[in-house]
Amino acid sequence: MVSTKHVVLGLLLERKGYAYELQQRLDTRFAFLGLSKNVVYPLLDALAQRDGWARIVGYMPPASPRSAPRPIYAPTSEGEDEFVRWIGEPCELGQAREDIYVKLVLSRPLDWQRVLAMADGLEAACLVALRELQDSGQPSLEELMDLDPSDEVVTAVLVDDAELLRLRAAMAWLDRVRVYGLKRLERLDGDG
Amino acid sequence: MRVIPAPLLSLENVSKTYTRGLHALRVLRGVSLEVHAGEFIAIYGQPASGKTTLLKVAAGFESPDGGAVRFRGDDLNRVSSGRLADLHLEEIGWVQRAGPQSSELPVVEHIALPLLSSRGNKKAHRLAKDALARVGAEACALETWANLADVERMWVALAQALVRRPRLLLVDDPTAGLDVMERQRVFALLRKVADDDEVGVVVAVPDLPSMLRAHDVRALSGGSLIAPPAPPGGRGKVIEFPSGERSA
């Protein structure tokens, strides 16, 4: 799992901000993380009060006369050091705990009809994800070579490209599962 | 009220098995697919997954063992051989990188060949040059097939299919031997053909990134054609409004 605390710290390093505005930046840039609403409030508390990686540097006027002023956060020097350390830390290779792997491990004896149905379902999910990438309207990484894009566009395209190649690997694996499963079923039919 | 037009091409529960000695190889298992005018569908499959067989059956070059293949309502397995030949000449474009019989024939002659009897020599050549220009390969016009690079052969093959102004274009792996930028160009052109000319385009490809240009995607695996669930409201290109406007 990605450390959401470090994501918020990174946003603060880009520019200081207050909770509501940071939540909006989080929602816009990192929608794919599927974070719950208002997640930024406890994270800012943790960053400022427990870790010492951020501090309050001022206040925005309250949104209404009855509400409290809104603290503006900025990273501390310890926070900057921590962010650099975190960026250099090896990334976890995600997605190794998808449903189908867990179900495969728990399927004893293997019911190949069921495994093939699971493969169909997962492949359809891969195609849905592919459609979403189509609909995102991002240029491809290859198309970027002819452009002079902003860093924001480049990072978005790199993330999409990673997702695309992950889908390709998943679909190649599903094909192997299906080819092997069909052979096993045909052999079972022959024996029967 | 939305009107969904009849598909240009439909495969209904199509199956195909090849027999090699004592072994039967089931290549297609109950494959169903609909392609509408102006729709660009990319089919992803691993090598030897049956992509070429699927396209050949869709084109009417091979008969299915079971199920039906219909082009504009006609069952391709039941039409006369003359009618099928006419369809291949005029309405169903098949893109393959096989060159002309004569290695001495300039590319423009090769492309003009199918039009000579219906359009006459002069017009056929003009249309052949236009087709080459459309794919950006006009410089190849006087070259022979043997002198063309892989990517040029792809463009020429596309021009040869497009010159007939087909309603349906079937393209078997246009990415082989092409670098990533060239693949992008090929798929951008196919998208344009579908969007601008209302041609139904089906491409089989082993390369997932290329598929992003398509309107919709499928995967062929183990002989089955997997489709993503239809999104609410459809995907636009297949839905036509009575006014003639199309959804985006």
Image (tube, coloured by chain):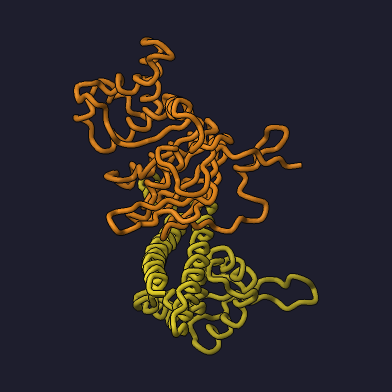
Chain colours: A yellow, B orange
Tell whether B22 sits left or right of A37. left
Visible residue check, residue A191: yes
Residue A43 percent coordinates (x, y): 56, 81
Quadrant where the image shows the C terminus of chain A: bottom left
Instruction: Indicate whether B115 appears above or below B239.
Output: above
Image point 58% across, 36% down: which residue?
A: B73
In the figure, residue A83 lies in which quadrant?
bottom left
B176 vs B210, left or right, is left
Number of numbered discs visible in the structure rendering? 0
Residue B36 vs residue A149, the one in the foreground: B36
Q: Measured from the top left, where is residue A150 in percent x and y?
A: 44, 53
Position of residue B246 in the picture relative to residue A84 (left or right): right
Residue B77 is situated, as x and y percent measured from the top left of the image, at: 48, 38
Q: Out of A27 and B217, give the one closest to the viewer.
A: B217
Residue A66 or B18: which is nearer the viewer?
A: B18
Whether residue A137 can be seen here: no
- Image vertical order of residue B205 relative to residue B74, above or below: below
Residue B45 lies, with reference to residue B41, above or below; the image says below
Q: Residue at x 61, y 43 (%)?
A: B238
Which residue does the image show at 59% across and 76% down from the upper left? Answer: A40
Spot the residue most to the right: A66
Task: Name the image quarter holding residue B149.
Answer: top left
The answer to which of A25 and B54 lies nearer the viewer is: B54
Quarter of the view holding residue B106:
top left
Horizontal and vertical percent for residue B111? 34, 23
